[in-house]
Image (tube, rainbow, N blue to C red):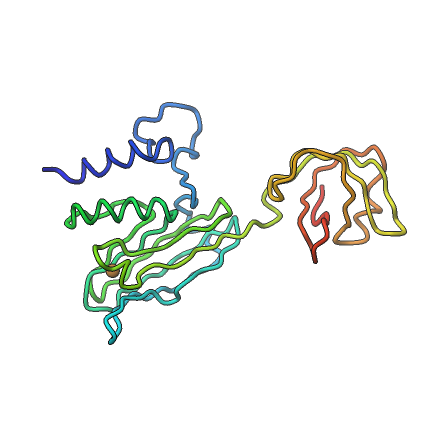
Amino acid sequence: MNTKILYTTFLIALSGPVFASGSHTGGHGDMMKEMMIGMPGDASMVTRTIEVTMKETDDGDMIFEPSSFNINQGETVRFAIKNAGELEHEFVLDTIKENAMHKEMMAKFPEMEHDDPNAVRLSAGEEGEIIWSFTNAGSFEFACLIPGHYESGMHGDVVVEAVGGVEYTKGTVKKINAKSGKVTIIHEELTNLGMPAMTMVFRVAEADMLEKMNAGDEIQFIADRVKGKLTVIQMK
Ligand SMILES: [Cu+2]
């Protein structure tokens, strides 16, 4: 039986457009490679290298060091992964749900190997890397899905924080209150804050932003919570 083909078919059937790049004929360009957790990154865009060690412990656990990552949305990270243990291990980046599904498949077909850009499998002593672009904010996971390893401790959280600077929102300046350092903006949806289009009062991150605004101006801006207050952190 060809488990590799079965596995791929299974993923396409369950995952919809995310994995269906092979049969995708639409015009989304690179979007078709994108997964919830992001997409393969470009080496020239790497902003940070995270060294990850996989190994077994004397108490019979299997671990990743470090055991969690905090990443900013938009970052391209090089994971330099070393298997310092005596068993084979893998490093798979995905959603918790996808990892759980892969794990189930691996339990049925233990000989199955991943050949996906979000995963690397290493023999004892081997080193490898994944360059990954975290395009979406959210809570994800990295794990070793070799049967029994996840349960022995081989998984951890990947938290990708939404960061301003990713998407500008269009708005119209309604009113400026220089004295209180606030501006009222009629804005489109603020996706990073999950806020629909409306008219709202914002603070500004830098005082001179107000000097550049006039009532009636069409602006593009990025807003985020700063010390709990909605604040314009960038504008153009
Ligand atoms: Cu493992």
- Is 222 above or below relative to 149? above
From this viewpoint, which residue is outermost toward the left?
1
Q: Nearer the viewer, residue 203 or 222?
A: 203
- Residue 221 placed where, x, y %? 70, 41
From this viewpoint, which residue is outermost toward the right?
179
- Is 87 above or below relative to 104? below
Q: Nearer the viewer, residue 118 or 111?
A: 111
Q: State which quadrant residue 15 falls in.
A: top left
- Residue 162 placed where, x, y %? 56, 49
- Residue 195 placed where, x, y %? 65, 39
- Residue 103 placed where, x, y %? 26, 49
Q: Nearer the viewer, residue 129 or 155?
A: 155
Q: Is residue 153 left or right of residue 38?
A: left
Quadrant of the rendering where the C terminus is positioned: top right
Quadrant of the rendering where the N terminus is positioned: top left
- Ligand number 1: quarter of image: bottom left
Q: Residue at x 32, y 66 (%)?
A: 53
Q: Is residue 186 left or right of residue 111?
A: right
Q: State which quadrant residue 184 falls in.
A: top right
Q: Residue at x 62, y 44 (%)?
A: 193
> What is the number of callouts on the image?
0
- Is 132 above or below relative to 175? below
